[in-house]
Image (cartoon, grey):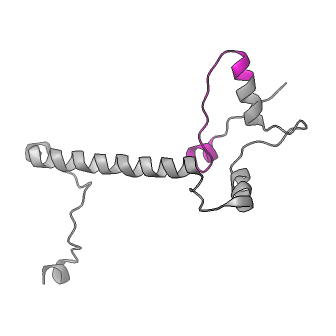
Amino acid sequence: MHKQDTGCTGERDKVQYVPMNAYGWGTMMRDYCYLEDVGRKVSECGNDIVRGGYMGNTGASKAASMHKFSRGRKSTTGRSKRDALRNYLETLGIDVEFLPAGMERRHLNQSTFDQK
């Protein structure tokens, strides 16, 4: 009857605001469990991306989808601007890591490398 009257789904709102005067041990443990769950989900997604399963593609279609996320045009030597930047930074002794294909921040990144 409660669910019909209030539209309640039976699950608590995990991100609901709790005032400091009502924040106690139980609330802290629920928050901790929520953060642990978020960490597990992020780890699962990261592992899927590393394994190449983010897009759900295999074979040639997977290669085509990976090309969709590459930034910059291919140069005449067949290398992307990202590869050129990585090689240049390596000559300067700078270690750099790029986000894997499929990550939103990699797609939104507007950084470029101009060989001139």
Closer to the camera in the image, 57 or 93: 57
State left or right for residue 75 relative to residue 40: right
Any part of residue 24 in sight: no
Q: Quadrant of residue 87?
A: top right
State left or right for residue 75 relative to residue 89: right
- Is residue 90 one of those drawn in magenta? yes
- Is residue 63 one of those drawn in magenta? no
- The residue that appears at 23% across and 55% down in the rendered structure is 16
Compared to residue 33, the image places residue 94 above or below, namely: above
In the picture, which quadrant includes the C terminus?
A: top right
- Residue 80 pos. (x, y %): 78, 38
Q: Which residues are magenta?
A: 88-109
In the picture, which quadrant includes the N terminus?
A: bottom left
Any part of residue 44 in sight: yes
- Residue 66 pos. (x, y %): 69, 52
- Residue 38 pos. (x, y %): 35, 50
Compared to residue 78, the image places residue 97 above or below, namely: above
State left or right for residue 36 relative to residue 30: right
Q: How many marks?
A: 0
Compared to residue 94, the image places residue 14 above or below, namely: below
Instruction: Looking at this view, name the residue that lies furthest to the top.
Output: 92
Closer to the camera in the image, 13 or 89: 89
Q: Quadrant of residue 7?
A: bottom left
Closer to the camera in the image, 66 or 6: 66
- The residue that appears at 21% across and 63% down in the rendered structure is 12
- The residue that appears at 25% across and 56% down in the rendered structure is 14
